[in-house]
Image (spheres, coloured by chain):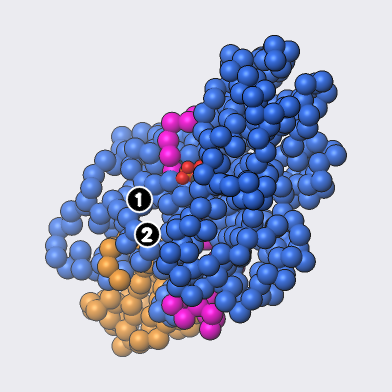
Amino acid sequence: MTGTARKFSFDTLLVHGGSEPGPGGATTVPIVQSSSFAHKTAEELEDIFRGRKLGQVYTRVGNPTTESLEKRLALLDGGIAAIATASGMAAITTAVLAIVRSGDEILASSSLFGGTFSLFRDTLSNYGIKTAFVNPTDLAAVRGAINERTRLIFVETIGNPKMDVPDIHELSAIAGEAGVPLMVDATVTTPYLARGADLRADIVVHSTSKFINGTGSTIGGAIVDLGRFNWQSGKYPHFAPFFSKYRGFAFTARVRKLMHKDFGACPAPMNSFLLSEGIETLALRMERHCANALGLARFLKGHARVGWVNYPGLEDSPCHGVAKRLYGGRFGGVLTFGLADKAEAFRFINGLVLARNLANIGDAKTLVIHPASTICSDFGPEEKGLMGVKEEMVRVSVGIETIDDIIEDFDTALNNL
Amino acid sequence: MMNLTVNGKKAAIDGKDAVNIPALLTELKVEQPDYVTVELNGDILERENFETTLVKDGDSVEFLYFMGGGGR
Ligand SMILES: Cc1ncc(COP(=O)(O)O)c(C=O)c1O
C-alpha cells in the first residue's frame, strides 16, 4: 500500500490504493462485519495492546474493511495516515479536539458549513474552547485575529454554501509563521481537485458522505494527517507523550489511541465498504460534476429570472483566480444562485422535476435546497450574512446526469415562475 | 551470529555481526515498516538515522505501532 503503490497515478490509486486481493481472489474489499477479533494466546493480545505487534482488536478502534479505506484515503491526499470516522462531523470533532483544549482558541473561517459553525460557536464554547470567526479571504484579518491562545486555523477549501475560496497556500504560510496547524475541510473539492499535500494543509478532514461516496448511500468522514506539522512545541504539551514515542505520527497516534478510541465515532464496516466502492469512480464523477456545474452556472447567469450566480468557475467570480490556481481549472459541483425572494425560490424548487429537494451535496443526482429556511434556519441574520446565506438563495449540488436534462429542468421551473 | 532481545523475546540473526535498521526490519519481517517506531536499548531512534544506526550482538530492540490495540 505504501512503498509500491506510490508510483501509481491518482486515478489508479482511486481504484487500487490500499486494497489487497480478498479471500478466494475477491476483487472488492471484504466486509468484515465483526465487533472483535480473537487471538490465539494471551501474549499475542498483550503485544497488540502494547503496540508491539499489529493486529485488530475491536471495530471501534480498527477494522480490516475500514483500514483498507483509510490506506486509500491517505494515499489520495498524499498523507502519512488517515482515520475514517462515522461522519464528517465526527471527523471534525475528533480531529479538532485532539488539538485544542479548554482555554485554547480556534481561528475559523466565518463561512463554514452550518454544522461546523455551530460545533465551534455553540458546542465547544461550553467546554472552554473559544472560536474567533474571520473572513478567510481577508488575509490581513486572518493575521490580525491570531493571538497567543490560538492553537488551530480551520477553513473549508470552498465554503459551503458561501462558495468563497480562501487561498490555502497563503493560509498555510500564515499558520506556519504562527506555529499552529492548518486544518482544511476539503469536502467540496475532494482530493481530486487538490490533494491535501499540494494544498500544504497540516490536517485534512472530509465528509466522505458527499462526493467521495458519490451515490448518497452512506454517511462517513475522514481525518488525513499530512505529516507536516511539528508537534514538539510548547503550545502543545499534550502532544509530548505522543511525540516522544511516535515522532512524525504524533497527531495520528493521539487521535487513534486517545480521541477516536474514546469518542467512539467509528464507521460501520458496511459503510467503509460502500465508501471504498464509491471512491473508485471519484475522478470520472468529479470531472462531470465540475463540467455540469460550469454549464449550469453559465446557463443560469444568462437567464432573465436569475438575479445572481455564485460559482468560482465563472470568470467574474471574485474567487475565480485563486480557485483556478489551487484547483487546476476545476471548480467543484456546488453553486448558489438568487431569485427575487424566498417565495420565488420556493416556487422554483417546487417546479423542478429532475432535481431533488434535500439536505445533501455530492450525490450523483442533482440536488437543490433553500438553505435559509432549512440547514441554516437556526442562525440569525448576522450569522446568515457571514455564511453568505440569503433569503432568495438556492443551493445546487449539480449531479452527473446529462447537462441538457439538468438545464431543461431548471429552465422549465424558471420559466414557470 | 547476533543475539538480540526483540520485543522482550530472544532472537538471533545468523551470519552477521551488525545490521542497520532497514536491514533489521527486513530480516525480522517487521510488518508495515513505514509506520513502526524503533527503540534501541531504551532510546527511540529518529527515522532519519535508521540507515546509519547499527544493531549489534546483545542489543535490545522494541517495535512500537500506534495502530491496532485499544490501550494506551
Ligand atoms: C463542508 C462540509 N463539512 C462537513 C460536513 C458534515 O459531514 P457529515 O454530514 O458527513 O457529518 C458537511 C455536510 O454535511 C459539509 O458540507
Image quadrant where residue A297 sits? top right
Q: In the rendering, at what x and y percent does residue A96 appear?
A: 49, 62
For marks 1 and 2, the one nearer the N-term is 2
- State the extent of the magenta-drawn residues as a range: A215-239
Q: In the rendering, at what x and y percent does residue A100 appear?
A: 49, 69
A344 left or right, relative to A94: right
Picture layout, residue A46 above or below residue A85:
below
| Chain in orange on the image | B
Q: Is residue A92 magenta?
A: no
Picture layout, residue A366 above or below residue A85:
above
Q: Is A191 or A131 nearer to us in this picture?
A: A131
Q: The residue under label 2 is which amino acid type?
A: His
Q: In the rendering, at what x and y percent does residue A58 appear?
A: 25, 54
Task: State which chain disc 1 sits on.
Answer: A
Residue B14, numbered circle: none
Task: State which chain disc 2 sits on.
Answer: A
Q: In the rendering, at what x and y percent does residue A186 appear?
A: 60, 49
- Residue at 58 percent across and 47 percent down: it is A380
Q: Quadrant of the C terminus of chain A?
A: top right
A237 left or right, relative to A48: right
Picture layout, residue A74 above or below residue B60:
above
Q: Is residue A178 visible to the viewer in this orientation of the structure?
A: yes
How many other residues sit within 10 Å of disc 2, few (<14), some (14-19) or many (≥20)? many
Mark 2 sits on what residue?
A260
Mark 1 sits on what residue?
A266
Q: Would you say the residues marked 1 and 2 are in contact, meaning their CB atoms lie under 8 Å apart?
A: yes
